[in-house]
Image (cartoon, helix red, strand yellow):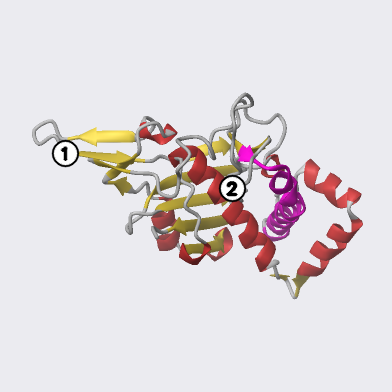
Amino acid sequence: MGQIKRPGSTDGIGYYTAWEKSSENGCIYCGKPAFTREHVPSKAFLTKPYPQDLATVPACFECNNGFSSDEKYVSCFLDILKESVYQGYTRRADTSKRLSDDINLSNLIAEQIKPIDGKVKFVVDENKLRRILLKLAQGHAGYEFDHINFDNSNITIWYEFAFNLSLDIEQEFEEIPEMAFMPEVGSRSCVTPFILQNVETGEALAFMLWNEVQEDQYRYQVFYNEAGGVSVKIVIYELLYARIDFGLS
């Protein structure tokens, strides 16, 4: 089983992907010098008490704060949509507080999610949703694989809601893919996958398991895709299923 070198990095492992207060850091999102750290995933998608040792990556001040509004929108939209579709589900307390504190956001989501003739009609802001999915995937790819090659022309984003998923698509999404390659030595995930080895031939395969950050709130998976690039799967609130593929340039 071979190893894939991290593409795009000339500043050493961790410069863009491992926050160290006493060291120089680069922003995982824009590449500028970073003096703050960003949680991956953002706490906007988690509930208190937050998981201990929540992963962080370096981020400049502008990027660290520049996603907050869209993250709040996506978090609230998904939670309200889930409450509207599934009987017995109650929105999170922090969703209610955010909407109470932001009347414009509350009005916007009320316009975008409406029950009509016994069905829930909804329209999500595609730009905000895709921007946040990409941001989350960059953080996971960077943290797990030390991957920073985020050429926008080489990225695909797919997502779907749980109530629209066929059984076949859901099963395929949930699969734990085989990886014929390992991340570069020094990356966190070079020592964390589940590895099976044939004792007779010596052939080995690696499997990147699902990382459940918080039950029923957020989980993700990072792996090498068929093209040799990095893929990130994300499930938010067990409602939104997303896959983001970073190809090799």
Displayed quadrant of residue 5? top left
Report x, y in % for residue 201.
Answer: 9, 36
- Callout 1 amino acid: Glu
In the current view of this chain or complex, which residue is farthest to the bottom?
A: 117
Give the residues drawn in magenta, as a range: 58-85
x 54%, y 33%: residue: 18
Report x, y in % for residue 35.
Answer: 68, 35
x 85%, y 58%: residue: 106
Displayed quadrant of residue 61? top right
- Residue 19 lies, with reference to residue 82, above or below; the image says above
Question: Which tag is nearer the camera, tag 2 or tag 1?
Answer: 2
x 30%, y 39%: residue: 206
Report x, y in % for residue 22.
Answer: 62, 24
Please give the residue where the numbered disc 2 appears in the rendered image: 31
Q: Quadrant of the C terminus?
A: bottom left
Please give the residue where the numbered disc 1 appears in the rendered image: 203
